[in-house]
Image (cartoon, grey):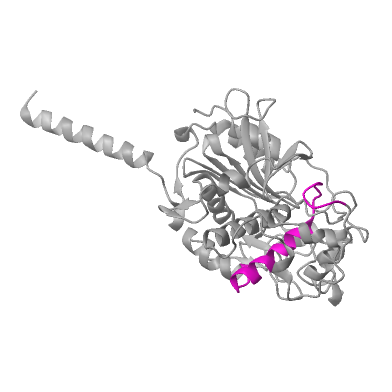
Amino acid sequence: MTRTAVLAALLCAAATLAIRAQEAATLWPTRGWTVASPASQGLSGDALDAIDRGAREGVYGNVDAILVVRNGRLVADYRYDRDYREISRGHDGPIGCGEGCDDPARLHQYNYLHPRWHPYFQGTSLHTLQSVTKSIAATIIGLALEDDEIASLDAPLLPFFENRDLTGVDARLRTATLRDLLTMRTGIEWHETDRPLDDTNTTLQLERSDDWIAFTLSQPMDADPGTKWAYNSGGSALMAGVIRDATGRHIDEYAARRLFAPLGIRAFHWKRTPTTHPDTEGGLYLSAPDLAKIGYLYLRDGMWEERRLLPEGWVRDATSRHVTGAAGGWDYGYQWWVTSRGGADGVDGVDGVDIWAARGFGGQFLILIPSRDIVAVVNAWNVFGVRSRGIFEPLVEALLSDVER
């Protein structure tokens, strides 16, 4: 081999090593996701194509978007055009009225059947997240901890609302902490998942009230704080008041500076309640790629571009099983759901794969599989009473097909 050929071979080898080193380095999607094929990242393209085909055929109902990221690379980005004007036309019920509704009193942002507000916000690409908002609001509590705006999750809850008249509040609530709030164990009596979507549902009552914080704090207690788990959107709505008191800013303003800007999220909409507090139980709208960034932040232990945004240990604590057997095979953390697949005891490895998820009404999912470095987003709007197959299980099965560890 000539000297020139040897030099060329060495240069080629060096270039290859440089490329591999670059590929192995953490990718930060602040300015957009790097695109790759599923196979290049150890995922089954056929399995994901089958999910896409089912979504297009309506197997999973009104799916609007499916997005998958592995190793920081966007490997699937499926979008589905749905004519919600026609889909919603003539629908009427306790949660709203669809296209053709002409009652001015019902044409507002909490009309879940009207295409002006749901699932997209007024014709934009911003999709309603519903209760995925809860997980993001809890994340912002974590940001306030990192900023020392909040001293501890063991801080009592009620002092964050000391500017209100608390004389009628059950005395037991005075022992509730922020940790109880985040894990939905305040002891406040709440009927949401055990009631139909009608006038007996406490969350529908909340959304029709003039002051969401006052409404929630005035509810009776049916347990001591920390002793009983109950899904409680009113408790989640209190997070807006906590951030307002702790930081002096509304949570959407605080999030724009401390969370959205560092992640490169420029467009969002956050509904506000009658008292101008942002709706932290279900009012945030984001695009699917931007929602995936929040999941990626969790897979990077709260770091972003070598900067720590969330406190060290926050991700571990937020996704720990603080409540086991919360509902339907799920455990519960800090407004995050936790489950596992492939094993009985939920330990990642031989016995199973841990899955963290934010979940929302209508079919919203932010799915994280930390041991596989996978983020998946599903946006849908299955609220019109049409029976369809749930997408979570088949999607997770596809994500775990042919994955190389």
Instruction: State the image coordinates of residue 172 (x, y, percent, origin top left).
Output: 83, 58
Instruction: State the image coordinates of residue 274 (x, y, percent, origin top left).
Output: 77, 75
Q: Is residue 90 visible?
A: no
Q: As rendered, which of 161 and 251 lies closer to the eye?
A: 161
Q: As rendered, which of 270 and 252 lies closer to the eye?
A: 252
Q: Image check: 12 left or right of 162?
A: left
Q: Is residue 44 visible?
A: yes
Return the residue found at the far right.
200
Return the residue found at the far left.
3
Is residue 232 one of those drawn in magenta?
Answer: yes
Residue at 47 percent across and 38 percent down: it is 37
Q: As rendered, which of 227 and 323 lies closer to the eye?
A: 227
Q: Is residue 263 above or below residue 75?
A: below
Q: Quadrant of residue 331?
A: top right
Number of callouts: 0
Is residue 283 one of those drawn in magenta?
Answer: no
Instruction: State the image coordinates of residue 36 (x, y, percent, origin top left).
Output: 45, 41
Range covered by the magenta-colored residues: 223-251
Q: As rendered, which of 100 and 142 lies closer to the eye?
A: 142
Instruction: State the image coordinates of residue 332 (x, y, percent, origin top left).
Output: 71, 44
Quarter of the image with the N terminus in it: top left
